[in-house]
Image (cartoon, grey):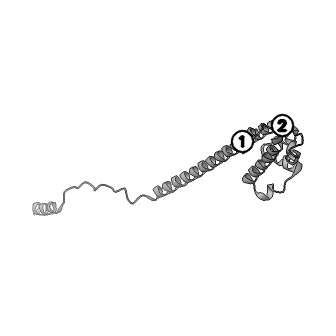
Amino acid sequence: MDTDVTTQLLSQLRDIHAPSTLSWWPLAPGWFAVAFLALTAALWIGYRNYQCYQKTLRRKNILKHLNELKENLTLEEQYPLVYQDLSTLLRRIALMTHERNAVAHLTGDDWLGFLDAQCQTQLFSRDIGRLLLSAPYFQSNQLVANPEPLLKVTEEWINRCV
């Protein structure tokens, strides 16, 4: 009888089967966290690169305009116009990079101090930079200093601070 029971019990056993292959879906919760962090990092890097690109493009456009001003240095009668355009360009740069309330009201030494404070320099409040206060208001028949040194100072300021 033992053999009958044993045979009967053995007949109820099934063969050993290998487990089915595991599916990659659904993902474990940790993978969702990794995907979220990777997406966040990619978006942040993309945004920073876009900001850098915009800043570089803005600087190129400003320097292009500055080079156009340098080309207008052919006649001494145009010097006051170059100073006016340079003063306008510096105002526009300041308004692009800072809040209007902080920049628009600045005049005289406060304006030159603001320009110097952007790069911790004394480029504008001393020597040739002081011409920004008076030269834009001269008439074309008045004698005005050559603006080329001020254009160089402005170009240096743009490259360092904008």
| Disc with the residue nearer the chain's start (1 vs 2) | 1
Three-letter code for the amino acid on which mark 1 is drawn: Glu
Q: Which residue was labeled with disc 2?
A: 146
CB of mark 1 within 8 Å of CB of mark 2? no
Disc 1 is placed on an element classified as helix
Q: Quadrant of the N terminus?
A: bottom left
Say what amino acid the circle numbered 2 marks.
Asn
On screen, 4 above or below 115? Answer: below
Tell me, for residue 68, which label it has, or none: 1
Seen at 87% across and 40% down, the residue is 144
Instruction: Say which mark, if any, is on residue 126.
Output: none
Relative depth, front residue between 99 and 151: 151
Q: Quadrant of the C terminus?
A: top right
User: Toward which corner of the image does residue 148 lie, by quadrant?
Assistant: top right
- As helix, strand or loop, the secondary structure at mark 2 comes to loop
Q: Residue 79 location, x and y as percent? A: 82, 41
Whether residue 24 sits left or right of residue 160 in the image: it is left
- Left or right of 82? Residue 61 is left
Report the residue at 78% width, 39% height from top.
Answer: 151
